[in-house]
Amino acid sequence: MPSTPRRILVDLCHPAHVHFFRNPIQLWREAGHEVYMAARDKDVALPLIREFGLDCQSMGASRSGIAGLARELIQRDLALFRFARQMKAEVITAIGGVFAAHAAFLSRIPAVVFYDTEIAKLQNAMTYPLASRVAVPRCYESWVPRRRELRYAGYHELSYLRPGRFQPDHGRALQAGLDATRPTFLLRLVAWTANHDLGDSGLSIQRAQQIVERLSAHGKVVISSETPLPDALREYQYTGMVSELHHLMAFCAGYFGESATMASESAVLGVPAVYAAHSPRGYTNEQESRYGLVRNVRQLDATSVLAACDWLLAQDQTTCEAARAKLLAETVDVAAFAADTVLAAAAAGR
């Protein structure tokens, strides 16, 4: 890691981004670099930042819909540009990075974008040409500007869930809702308000109820949801701390949900996962074809969804642990890779 002190601005637009950058931030600060954070009020991002004891500058709440996202883009680009100038940042980094790339371009400093979501075509078209570096997993299945592209063996989730970066705690998992006497299954429902979710949709409430019914016959079900649950599902609501969810996940018997990120989190922890959504991801495709830890479900009818439940129930812990060992052996320390990549860009300049 380069030793010249740098002033780094990190733009955190989603809870998963907080997790991704937490360890790189620690590595930068331990090496004597100054790190500043801007945050977007999205889902549980701000509570998660507070739980980890990180300081940040809030840039306002996220918006939804085409008009709302367009208005947010203009307002947040300008706010982030002003913050970067105020902090005298030498580099801006983010996941997705549409605001970061624009603010960095206006500031004439490098922007390093990490991303893994191929379907965000409009966002990527607005971001990649203005970024100094675009770092994507080896399994990324879409366009990246050739001269700006960096590929690595790994997934975003390994930045914070790789052994040495994260140690699952059984006691904390129990406090977060793990059942000590029978298998626990985690179900994730999302709000479908992200820019890459426009025009997309997920599981119906009826389908979610069918999943709960099938999995409940074999253990306890915990639901993590971005939106309020209907009365019929409210008893399954996750009530633990946001920062404790990965401890619960690590000891679950399986994951089923609309979040590709959480499917990947489960996979790198050795927990079998079903990713149920219309939109594909290169990383969950690889985690299915290369390691067998994920099952991707694109048709959300009752037959397909219940067959995926049966697949999840049939998974063997020993086989999953072996698959995880193979995954870890074939991937890099993503936190260290991210930290080094940002510092290299800062040293190179725009």
Image: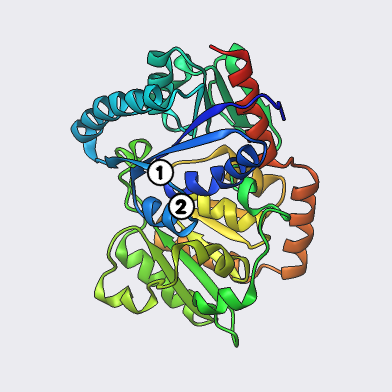
Q: Secondary structure at mark 2?
A: loop
The amino acid beneath tag 2 is: Ser
Q: Of residues 155 and 172, which is closer to you in this image?
A: 172
Q: Residue at x 26, y 70 (%)?
A: 230
Instruction: Measure the alpha-carbon separation of dots 2 and 1.
Output: 26 Å
Residue drawn at x 57%, y 41% is 25
Question: Looking at the picture, how far across and down is residue 75, in whole percent?
Answer: 24, 28
Res. 122 image quadrant: top left
Q: Which residue is mark 2?
A: 259
Q: Point out residue 223 in the picture as x, y percentages from the top left corner.
A: 42, 69
Instruction: Please state if 292 lies on the left or on the right of 265 as rendered.
Output: right
The tally of labels here is: 2
Q: Given the image, on which type of amino acid does mark 1 rest? A: Cys
Q: Identify the element where label 1 is drawn.
A: loop
In the depicted view, which residue is nearer to us: 28 or 149? 28
Mark 2 Cα-neighbour bin, 10 Å: few <14, some 14–19, many ≥20: many
Mark 1 lies on residue: 56
- Which sits in the foreground, 120 or 54? 54
